[in-house]
Image (cartoon, helix red, strand yellow):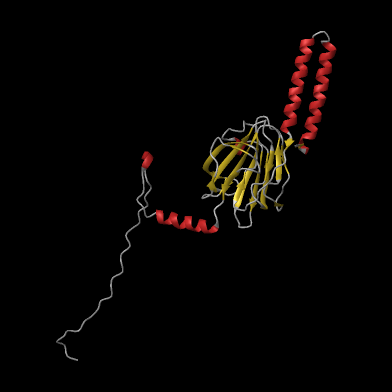
Amino acid sequence: MTIHKEGYSSIALCILFIFVLNAFIQFFFPDYTVVRWIFYILSFALFVIILQFFRSPKITITKDERSVLCPADGKVVVIEETTETEFFKDKRIQLSVFMSPINVHINRNPISGVVKYFKYHPGKYLVAWHPKSSTENERTTVVTENSTGIQILFRQIAGALARRIVWYVKEGDVVEQGDQFGFIKFGSRVDVFLPLGTRINVNIGDVVKGGHTVLAELASNKNKATQSTASIADLTKPLSNQHDNPTLIVEHDDVPKPKKAATTTKSKNSKD
């Protein structure tokens, strides 16, 4: 277990704060032994919390081009089909992982490939589980394309406590699955947007580990073609109006069928 490089300055500031606070208590309350010990214990607890937050455990990465690794430690809070409006502008499967202050906050590449898009967005600091945090909070957006042409979008999202997002990638970089692409300080969230047809391996509420848990399995090109054919075939089935919603039916004018060419037959009694 080591300390992440992003934690050096924060740990130093924490030590300075603890030193000044305890010196103040010692100077102004020299005879209040109970009060001093309460502050000693609280100071130690604060130091341990900050220290564990910036821990950087060593993990073994198992790389697989079809697998989507979890980008962060935390809990799965969203799995839904939604419209991604920034880059793809179409339907995607959104999978979100919430990181509490006790989680490791290192962010890892879910797939290997080339970074096709990167953008930093300043924004609000809504609580990370708020539905609008994905589009209104301070965040970064990264799109990586693997060797088969499949693109995955993932976002670092700041929360109510997380006031600093750090990233290590830019457009054009070649990244490896499981390597670090960023860090978020304190409670936050990471969103992953996957193509429709992707097999999801986790459920809402699952505790996941960054670089270890396989969130999903990408569909191969062959599977995509099969799914596309199946979806077209499904259009021949009767339409459903469940949920009491009206079904849209587009009517077309009848196209007249072409008339058959008239054929002439010779009468058996006719002479040549």
* Residue at the bottom extreme of this rendering: 272
Residue 17, image quadrant: top right
Residue 50 seen in render: yes
Q: Residue at x 83, y 16 (%)?
A: 24
Q: Residue at x 65, y 37 (%)?
A: 73
Q: Quadrant of the C terminus?
A: bottom left
Residue 201, image quadrant: top right
Q: Residue at x 60, y 49 (%)?
A: 67
Q: Is residue 210 above or below residue 112?
A: above
Which percent across, then down, holds residue 91?
52, 47
Which percent across, then down, holds residue 213?
61, 43
Q: How many marks?
A: 0
Which percent across, then down, holds residue 133?
60, 35
Q: Residue at x 82, y 8 (%)?
A: 31
Residue 91 seen in render: no
Please indicate whether residue 8 sits to the left or right of residue 198 in the image: right
Which percent across, then down, holds residue 264?
23, 80
Please indicate whether residue 13 sits to the left or right of residue 109 in the image: right
Residue 149, image quadrant: bottom right
* Residue at the top extreme of this rendering: 31
Q: Viewer-proximal residue, 187 or 165?
A: 187
Q: Is residue 118 above or below residue 129?
A: below
Please indicate whether residue 17 sits to the left or right of residue 111 in the image: right
Please indicate whether residue 210 sits to the left or right of residue 23 in the image: left
Q: Viewer-proximal residue, 237 or 102?
A: 102
Q: Viewer-proximal residue, 109 or 80?
A: 109
